[in-house]
Amino acid sequence: ETGVTQTPRHLVMGMTNKKSLKCEQHLGHNAMYWYKQSAKKPLELMFVYNFKEQTENNSVPSRFSPECPNSSHLFLHLHTLQPEDSALYLCASSQVVRGRARTDTQYFGPGTRLTVL
Amino acid sequence: QKEVEQNSGPLSVPEGAIASLNCTYSDRGSQSFFWYRQYSGKSPELIMFIYSNGDKEDGRFTAQLNKASQYVSLLIRDSQPSDSATYLCAVRYNFNKFYFGSGTKLNVKP
């Protein structure tokens, strides 16, 4: 596997289900991100992890729960979602280098298309 | 809230022409700027980034940055039908916080 991978690629769940999205990066990066992309809207940054520590929670509802067990893996645990949570969920990673932050670039995984019924 | 504005398009150009995509941002503290291409149903793919005023060229692509005007653009020379996609402008602010525009849809007509 190369780059950033995400599983599953498609997920349909009911409002009472619990599911998890998985992201794995094979780039040796030290930062990972979750984004939400809804139709006609900009990508919304949800969570940021630097060196496995969560550094950003962009006012995301508690029904979304991230987990970063190590710098290569990132999970998004989902429970009691709403239909408006249906979207493309994108994981990204980057290499953060102190003092060279301006060149920090993100690389995205293929995304998980989530449908909440 | 950091705003990143793009014209949603669609921008239609004939094959071989120059496509010009524009982006404005609200926060003068923004540090670096990125252009991504996103095909329908796919994830964003990095084209290039820029952080100094002026032009930066990479193949058929040129990014232009004007921090005084808070404006960044992407020029695509010799546009090809395969360039038809949505182009996302992203702005990096304060370490590793990134803000994205809604994207401009580009159609290159054969």
Image (spheres, grey):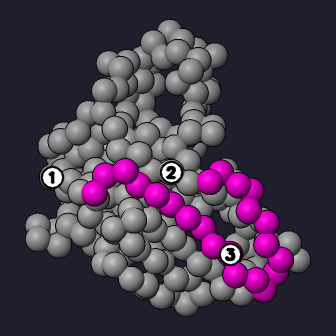
> What is the CA distance from the residue labelled 2 to the residue labelled 3?
18 Å
Check if mark 1 and mark 3 are on a common chain.
no
Image quarter of residue A13: top right
Instruction: Give the chain of mark 3.
Output: B
Residue A36 visible in image: yes
Residue B19, label in figure: 3
10 Å neighbourhood of mark 1: few (<14), some, or many (≥20)? some
User: Residue at (48%, 17%) from the top-left corner?
Assistant: A81
Q: Nearer the viewer, residue A115 or A11?
A: A115
Q: Are marks 1 and 2 on the same chain?
A: no
Q: Residue A51, which numbered label?
A: 1
Point out the tag, 2 or 3, that comes first from the N-terminus.
2
Q: Tell me the CA gap for discs 1 and 3.
A: 39 Å
Report if residue B25 lies within the magenta region.
yes
Check residue A28 in the rendering and tell me which mark sits there, or answer none. Answer: none
Q: In the picture, which quadrant includes the N terminus of chain B?
A: top left
Frontmost of labels 1 and 3 is 3
Please report contact status of discs 1 and 3: CB closer than 8 Å, yes or no: no
Task: Reply above or below: B92 against A116.
Answer: below
Q: Are marks 1 and 2 in contact (CB under 8 Å)?
A: no
Label 1 lies in what chain? A
Mark toward the viewer: 1 or 2: 2
Kind of residue sitting beneath label 3: Ala
- How far apart marks 1 and 2 lie (CA) works out to 31 Å
Q: Is residue A51 magenta?
A: no
| Marker disc for residue B5 | 2
Badge 3: residue crowd in 10 Å (few <14, some 14–19, many ≥20): many
Range of the magenta residues?
B7-28
Circle 2: element type: strand
Image position of B64 (left or right of B9): left
Q: Residues within 10 Å of mark 2 (few under 14, many from 20)?
A: many
Relative to A25, residue A61 above or below? above
